[in-house]
């Protein structure tokens, strides 16, 4: 096996590391914790998956990766048996490509691991123990005791699997012993089983005999019952005939009784008809006396209606007279309205003239007041402006003195300065006094004068008087208009009164309330008589029908009496042959009860037989279960004896392997030793405590140097790897040593490196992982590994 390249992406502390492996002695050098051993872990993980990694798969992802979805990937390219393989593995998948093919020959995490194990011919443990030599493993043998050395070699060479198999055999033997013990404890007593079978067979024989006897008795009882069935059926038919005749007699008697009662009813109804005929004549006479009542009542009803209308017209006449009186009184009050209208018009004209004079006077006074206020405000503003200008001139004059320019000609004032200044001051005083006057004048004119306010109040009063006069005039004019309407209304009332008087004169008279009530009573009596006569007439009309029904009833009675007599004769004849019914029923019921009891006895006997059969089946099942358990017990005993033999065989195999292990391992190590020492030392051997002894001229050297001890440890590790490779059928061409120098001093480290260089012809690739920089000079290729604290990643660089 030869490694070509390795690529790590986000694998532990390696963010993106790529290493190309050359032939010869390669060193991977870096401080502790820089990620050197992680490179070996990545090689094993790419081949065997998570079982070759430390921790779980979540710990493989680089911790400093912020994105938890960032890919984790290791890609290993190596050569084996003339073929080039490329294995790419991630946390969720894996692929293996052969000879740069585009399609993988194996995929999925499990599929690639299983393919690599088959192709390499090694389990993960065998691969590690063949190609890898772990930290401080060269001098581990010297630190172990005899038993620990034996266990170490057994584990490294895979002999511990024999111990595991033997332990499995022993565990299985203990399980078999427990099963045998449990099976024996759960087995029933054979004698009890055989007694149960014998008792069940005897019980079944007795039950079978009883069932046969009961069946015979049942057959005899059934045969006797079958002979009585026809006779019993004949007797039952005769009894049914008798019961039918008795029932028909009862029905005929009931019909006859109903016909008799019906004839009695018809007789009573005919008597009622005769009585009705006698009652009808007086009613007819009384009804004839009342025949004229409807016409008289109708005439009286018309007079009553006319009287009601008369009362209505009288009420309307009274209402019309009352309304006319009210209108006459209103008309009398409105006769003075035209005179009042003239007075109101004259007074309203006077008020309006006075209002016009007052409004004119108010307007004039308001105009004068507004003019004076505007003039005062304008004059005050002008004085303020003049005062400001004069103040500025005075300030200028006082500031410039005699050199001040003349306000008129612009020349310097000179001696005229004081006179001009006094003039300006006098003007300022005059303006100030005028300003005070006009400011007071403006304040005085800010409100209306009292005389204007009095005129305004007089105008408002006149306006109210004019409005009141207008409303009074309108009321008077409305009254004048109403006076004309009253005449029209009184004319209409006169027409209505004339119409009512005419209607009253046309209405008939003569209505009498007492006579009206008497006629109503007579009409009610006439209607009652009509109803009674109609009912009696209907009753009399049914006389022919009743007499016909009476004749039919009598005929039916005669027929029913004849039928009843005939039925009584048949009943007498049938009853004469019914004397044996009681004895026949008693015999039949006794035979039926006997047959039923025989059937029950037969069923009970069959049930007892079936229970005996079930008991026998249960006993037989127990006997078969006993036989099955005995057979199973014998099989378990055979398995236990077999596992006893296997335990002894594994013990013998381990003894033989241990006997063969030392000479075989010593022979392979002797070959490496002779090659590394150029024939100086040709052989070595192990004593009973697995201590390594060097032979010089077939003589054991009692003392060896430190360098010779390192040499012995190296050839021992190479011999172990060679034995594992030979058993798996792989060429032993790759050697990886991880921190094998341990606590060796500089001279011993140099010796080990030199020994490794002597193996160049035997191993194509030797990879040494160490943190010791001093071994760099003895290597063919160096891969430097450093940990970048800032980026929190491992960084590799290739060097000589």
Image (cartoon, rainbow, N blue to C red):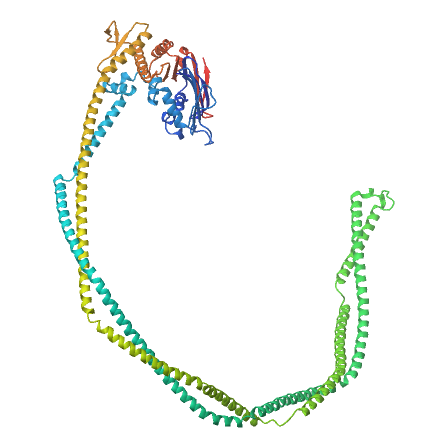
Residue under the point 82% across and 47% down: 418
Please give left or right for residue 759 compared with residue 64 in the image.
left
In the depicted structure, whether residue 278 falls above or below residue 168:
below
Viewer-side residue, 763 vs 259: 259
Residue 231 in sight in this render: yes
Please give left or right for residue 731 compared with residue 581 in the image.
right
Question: How many labels were placed on the picture?
Answer: 0
For the N terminus, the image quarter is top left
Residue under the point 79% across and 64% down: 369
In the picture, residue 36 is in which quadrant? top left
What is the x, y in percent for residue 663?
25, 12
Viewer-side residue, 416 vs 75: 75
What is the x, y in percent for residue 340?
78, 82
Please give left or right for residue 328 compared with residue 602 in the image.
right
What is the x, y in percent for residue 61?
42, 28
In the depicted structure, whether residue 212 falls above or below residue 160:
below
Residue 182 in sight in this render: no
Viewer-side residue, 358 vs 619: 619
For the C terminus, the image quarter is top left
Please give left or right for residue 39 compared with residue 381 in the image.
left
What is the x, y in percent for residue 542?
45, 85
In the depicted structure, whether residue 360 falls above or below residue 301:
above
In the depicted structure, whether residue 417 falls above or below residue 561:
above
Viewer-side residue, 196 vs 491: 196
In the picture, residue 667 is in which quadrant? top left
């Amino acid at each position: 096996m030869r490694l070509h390249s390795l690529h790590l992406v986000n694998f532990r502390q390696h963010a993106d590391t790529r290493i190309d492996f050359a032939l010869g002695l390669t060193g991977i050098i870096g401080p502790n914790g820089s990620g050197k051993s992680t490179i070996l872990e990545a090689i094993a993980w790419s081949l065997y998956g998570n079982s070759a990694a430390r921790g779980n798969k979540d710990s493989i992802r680089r911790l400093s990766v912020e994105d938890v979805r960032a890919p984790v990937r290791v890609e290993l390219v190596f050569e084996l048996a003339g073929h080039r393989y490329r294995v790419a593995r991630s946390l969720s998948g894996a692929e293996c490509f052969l000879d740069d093919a585009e399609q993988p020959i194996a995929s999925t995490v499990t599929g690639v691991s299983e393919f690599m194990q088959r192709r390499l011919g090694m389990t993960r443990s065998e691969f590690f123990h063949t190609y890898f030599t772990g930290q401080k493993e060269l001098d581990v043998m010297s630190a172990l005791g005899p038993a620990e050395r034996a266990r170490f070699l057994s584990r490294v060479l895979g002999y511990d699997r024999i111990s595991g198999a033997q332990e499995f055999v022993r565990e299985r033997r203990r399980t078999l012993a427990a099963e045998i013990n449990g099976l024996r404890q759960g087995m029933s007593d054979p004698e009890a089983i055989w007694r149960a079978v014998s008792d069940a067979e005897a019980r079944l024989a007795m039950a079978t005999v009883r069932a046969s006897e009961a069946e015979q008795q049942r057959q005899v009882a059934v045969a006797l019952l079958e002979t009585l069935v026809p006779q019993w059926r004949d007797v039952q038919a005769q009894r049914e005939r008798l019961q039918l005749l008795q029932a028909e007699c009862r029905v005929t008697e009931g019909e006859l009784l109903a016909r008799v009662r019906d004839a009695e009813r018809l007789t009573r109804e005919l008597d009622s008809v005769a009585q009705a005929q006698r009652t009808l004549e007086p009613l007819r006479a009384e009804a004839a006396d009342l025949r004229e009542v409807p016409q008289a009542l109708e005439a009286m009803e018309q007079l009553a209606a006319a009287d009601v209308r008369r009362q209505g017209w009288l009420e309307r006449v009274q209402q019309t007279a009352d309304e006319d009186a009210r209108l006459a009184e209103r008309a009398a009050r409105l006769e003075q309205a035209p005179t009042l209208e003239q007075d109101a018009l004259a007074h309203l004209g006077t008020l309006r003239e006075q209002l016009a004079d007052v409004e004119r006077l108010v307007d004039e006074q308001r105009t004068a007041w507004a003019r004076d206020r505007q003039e005062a405000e304008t004059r005050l503003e002008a004085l303020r402006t003049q005062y400001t200008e004069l103040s500025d001139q005075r300030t200028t004059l006082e500031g410039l003195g005699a050199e001040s320019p003349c306000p008129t000609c612009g020349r310097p004032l000179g001696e005229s300065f004081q006179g001009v200044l006094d003039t300006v001051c006098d003007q300022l005083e005059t303006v100030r006094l005028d300003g005070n006057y006009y400011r007071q004048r403006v304040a005085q004119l800010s409100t209306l004068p009292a005389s204007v306010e009095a005129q305004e109040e007089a105008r408002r009063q006149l306006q109210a008087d004019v409005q009141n006069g207008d409303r009074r005039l309108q009321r008077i004019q409305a009254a004048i208009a109403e006076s004309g309407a009253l005449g029209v209304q009184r004319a209409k009332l006169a027409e209505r009164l004339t119409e009512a008087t005419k209607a009253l004169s046309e209405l008939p008279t003569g209505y009498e309330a007492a006579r009206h009530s008497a006629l109503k009573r007579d009409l009610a009596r006439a209607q009652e008589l009509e109803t009674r006569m109609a009912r009696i007439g209907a009753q009399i009309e049914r006389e022919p029908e009743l007499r016909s029904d009476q004749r039919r009833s009598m005929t039916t009675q005669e027929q029913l009496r004849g039928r009843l007599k005939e039925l009584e004769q048949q009943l007498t004849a049938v009853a004469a042959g019914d004397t044996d019914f009681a004895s026949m029923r008693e015999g039949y019921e006794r035979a039926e009860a006997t047959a039923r009891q025989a059937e029950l006895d037969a069923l009970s006997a069959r049930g007892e037989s079936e229970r005996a059969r079930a008991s026998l089946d249960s006993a037989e099942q127990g006997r078969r279960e006993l036989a099955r358990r005995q057979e199973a017990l014998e099989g378990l005993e055979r398995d236990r004896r077999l596992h006893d033999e296997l335990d002894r065989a594994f013990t013998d195999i381990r003894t033989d392997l241990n006997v063969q292990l030392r000479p075989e391992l010593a022979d392979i190590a002797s070959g490496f030793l002779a090659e590394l020492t150029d024939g100086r030392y040709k052989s070595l051997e192990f004593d009973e405590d697995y201590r390594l002894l060097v032979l010089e001229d077939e003589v054991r050297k009692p003392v060896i140097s430190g360098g010779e001890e390192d040499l012995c440890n190296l050839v021992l590790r190479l011999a172990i790897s060679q034995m594992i490779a030979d058993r798996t059928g792989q060429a032993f061409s790759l050697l990886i040593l991880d921190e094998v120098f341990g606590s060796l001093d500089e001279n011993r480290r140099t010796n080990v490196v030199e020994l490794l260089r002597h193996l160049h012809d035997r191993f194509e690739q030797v990879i040494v992982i160490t943190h010791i920089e001093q071994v760099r000079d003895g290597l063919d290729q160096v891969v430097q590994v450093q940990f970048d604290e800032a980026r929190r990643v491992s960084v590799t660089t290739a060097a000589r």
